[in-house]
Image: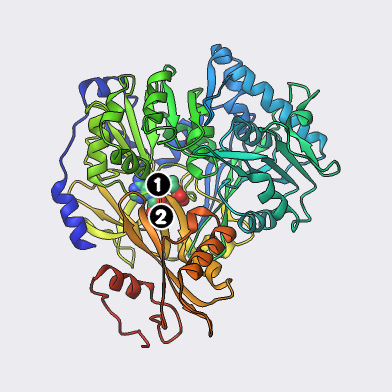
């Protein structure tokens, strides 16, 4: 790894912001503003919070009872009110809030007033089902506007949404419903992906069959004739909303009221329900969207994420709408029906801010520069990248094909952090491959195991002070929350290894633990392993990440077979199908190798590091704890 870092650093060039970029930017002098913000973070966050609307003010900005934080004490607010009503009351009433493009080319456009009416109807329909503040609603939808409507409707009346990415399989969905004990399920008949439809309703039927807490399932029916619904438990989305009033007052909620759970992978097989709250999360996503992307009223903001991931929560839905922005969101993949898909959308809708992922950029790179060249991309002014480290080659390509003069914001953050934490602002000089410097008000650092700051060199990425949009806990598992803060004294440990260079720039290098990043999706080795051993032919399994040209990392699994089982093409296929069924497509290992033993410590822990070193032909390092 050290070698990789050195070559990266050598390759780096510095790209100064253009005069034009600097002239328009909200923040023109990063160093000055950063120093001011961390000299008194509470004052900084207090000032930012005042840009939003609160029903009643706070008495204290922060109560910090290490490692438990409460922000904006005693204040009441509602994030949905700030996303909608704040704009509907203003000239933005008829401004376009959401432009949605479906995979088949359909277009739906919502002004702030229209989005607000839809959300209100949905909130009234939720109330009509008897749902009450604090109840959980699981949303398992493809990337369609109903997803945004349902999220905001829950928020409006204090329900907690748990959005589950629609690529997850029935068992994965089931465990997330069970953990949240949701009362309601909102889904659709199908999702579309590269021209094929996936039967989401079937996945939901299988999952809900084992979830007695679910009282009703709402189904958005996209196909004709509509899928059959069971009269007692299932309701068509349109019928559900029919007749509901288009006004519904947003409930005044304590700032610390949970807004959502979002399940993410950790180092064990059990996904964790990260808890975010209305007040602090609203402040963090609002200001990062505004400053990082320099978001102005004239902009068209295109974030390619799925709302099922945290990037979609924070930078499709909440952050942009809090700013009164016009967002573009499109169903489907970047290369379907052809690799010009996103470039075409950018040209067609005049996108000015484009937030994407390294995996998508690498995929588009494969199709060559002729595709972006075909389209007028001159409306673009700010670019963004998220989810995994962006290699300098992909950075340079993205920069070049979009005109060579638009800054790329390489934004580093996590589901747990809620908002972007380490990132350039448009006024910051860029180095391709580096997420540059901490956001205003954020004390990020690179430290050794004892927590000593590393002036220059590699170590662990940490955050030293609380920030408003940090997760408040892991649902039903406070110990797991504590483990983020117990790892390195006095710090929140992100789990990432990072290198700090002579200019204090951060170079994120990947995970320090057994969490993989496959095409930007977070997957734990333990989840894949437990899926594999639940197959009758497997007694033991170990999963590792291997570098992959487009996906960043791919999963390779090693399995020990049960007695009497034979390695064969059919068996490997059946193992892959099994993981597909248990977890979903994103977690299926690309390679599975049958072995007769696995490297273990004397206490029986599989040493994945040794497997990985062997696979990559590297030195395994210290193997003194290896049993055999
Ligand atoms: C990785 C995604 C390098 C990192 C928002 C982190 C990144 C994990 C970057 C969180 C980036 C995210 N550069 N690595 N710009 N952004 N990561 O929860 O390993 O899906 O810990 O949140 O993604 O993944 P999550």
**Where is mark 1, residue-wise?**
387
Q: Residue visible at 18% across and 34% down?
A: 15
State the residue in front, 446 or 50: 446
Indicate if the residue with disc 2 has its beta carbon within 8 Å of ligand 1: yes
Residue most extreme to the left: 10
Residue 312: x and y in percent read 50, 39
Indicate if the residue with disc 1 has its beta carbon within 8 Å of ligand 1: yes
> Up-down: is 597 above or below 91?
below
Q: Residue visible at 40% across and 36% down?
A: 335
Task: Please say whether residue 628 is visible from this viewpoint.
Answer: yes
Label 1: which secondary element: loop
Give the quadrant of the N terminus.
bottom left
**Where is mark 2, residue-wise?**
517
Q: Residues within 10 Å of mark 2 (few under 14, many from 20)?
A: many
Residue 114: x and y in percent read 63, 19
Left or right: residue 122 compared with residue 314: right
Residue 70: x and y in percent read 56, 47
State the residue in front, 313 or 222: 222
Q: Are marks 2 and 1 in contact (CB under 8 Å)?
A: yes
State the residue in front, 138 or 320: 138
Left or right: residue 463 compared with residue 130: left
Q: Residue visible at 43% across and 19% down?
A: 349
Give the quadrant of the C terminus.
bottom left
**Real-space Cα separation, disc 2 to disc 1, in angstroms:** 8 Å
Tell me the tag on residue 135: none
Quadrant of residue 7 in the image? bottom left
């Amino acid at each position: 790894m050290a070698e990789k870092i050195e070559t990266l650093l050598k390759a780096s060039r510095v790209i100064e912001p253009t005069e034009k970029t600097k002239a328009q930017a909200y923040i023109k002098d990063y160093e000055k503003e950063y120093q001011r913000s961390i000299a008194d973070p509470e004052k900084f966050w207090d000032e930012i919070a005042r840009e939003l609307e609160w029903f009643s003010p706070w008495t204290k900005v922060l109560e910090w009872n290490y490692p438990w934080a409460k922000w904006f004490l005693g204040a009441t607010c509602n994030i949905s009110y700030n996303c909608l009503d704040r704009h509907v009351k203003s000239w933005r009433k008829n401004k376009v809030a959401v432009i949605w493009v479906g995979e088949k080319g359909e277009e739906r456009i919502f002004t702030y007033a229209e989005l607000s009416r839809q959300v209100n109807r949905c909130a009234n329909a939720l109330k009509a089902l008897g749902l009450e503040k604090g109840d959980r609603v699981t949303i398992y939808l493809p990337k369609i506007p109903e997803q945004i409507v349902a999220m905001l409707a829950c928020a409006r009346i204090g329900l907690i949404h748990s959005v589950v990415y629609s690529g997850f399989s029935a068992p994965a969905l089931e465990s997330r419903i069970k953990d949240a004990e949701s009362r309601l399920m909102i889904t659709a008949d199908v999702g579309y992906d590269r021209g094929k439809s996936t039967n989401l309703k079937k996945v939901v039927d299988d999952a809900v069959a084992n979830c007695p807490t679910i009282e009703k399932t709402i189904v958005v029916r996209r196909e004709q004739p509509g899928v059959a619904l069971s009269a007692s438990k299932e309701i068509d989305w349109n019928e559900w909303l029919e007749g509901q009033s288009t006004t519904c007052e947003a409930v005044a909620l304590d700032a610390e009221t949970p807004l959502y759970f979002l399940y993410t992978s950790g180092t064990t097989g059990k996904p964790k329900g990260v808890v975010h709250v209305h007040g602090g999360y609203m402040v963090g996503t609002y200001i990062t969207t505004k400053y990082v992307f320099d978001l102005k009223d004239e902009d068209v903001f295109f974030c390619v994420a799925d709302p099922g991931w945290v990037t979609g929560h924070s930078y499709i839905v909440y952050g942009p709408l809090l700013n009164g922005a016009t967002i573009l969101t499109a169903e489907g993949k970047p290369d379907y029906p052809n690799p010009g898909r996103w470039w075409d959308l950018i040209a067609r809708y005049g996108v000015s801010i484009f937030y994407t992922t390294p995996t998508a950029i690498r995929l588009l790179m494969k199709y060559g520069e002729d595709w972006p060249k075909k389209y007028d991309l001159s409306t673009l002014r700010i670019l963004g990248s998220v989810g995994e480290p962006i290699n300098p080659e992909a950075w340079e390509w993205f920069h070049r094909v979009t005109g060579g003069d638009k800054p790329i914001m390489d934004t580093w953050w996590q589901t747990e952090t809620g908002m972007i934490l380490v990132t350039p602002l448009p006024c910051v000089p860029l180095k391709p491959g580096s997420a540059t410097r901490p956001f205003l008000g954020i004390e990020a650092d690179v430290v050794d195991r004892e927590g000593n700051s590393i002036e220059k060199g590699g170590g662990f990425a940490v955050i030293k002070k609380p920030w408003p949009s940090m997760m408040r806990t892991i649902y039903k598992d406070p110990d797991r929350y504590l483990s983020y803060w117990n790892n390195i004294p006095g710090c929140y440990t992100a789990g990432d290894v990072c290198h700090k260079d002579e200019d204090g720039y951060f170079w994120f290098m990947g995970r320090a633990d057994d969490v993989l990043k496959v095409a930007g999706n977070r997957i734990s080795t333990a989840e894949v392993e437990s899926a594999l051993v639940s197959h009758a032919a497997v007694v033991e399994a170990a999963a590792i990440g291997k570098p992959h040209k487009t996906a960043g990392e791919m999963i390779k699994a090693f399995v020990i077979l049960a007695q009497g089982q034979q390695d064969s093409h059919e068996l490997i296929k059946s193992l892959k199908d099994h993981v597909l069924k248990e977890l979903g497509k994103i977690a299926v290992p690309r390679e599975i190798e049958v072995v007769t033993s696995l490297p273990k410590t004397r206490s029986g822990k599989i040493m994945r590091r040794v497997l990985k070193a062997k696979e990559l032909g590297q030195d395994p390092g210290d193997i003194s704890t290896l049993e055999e």
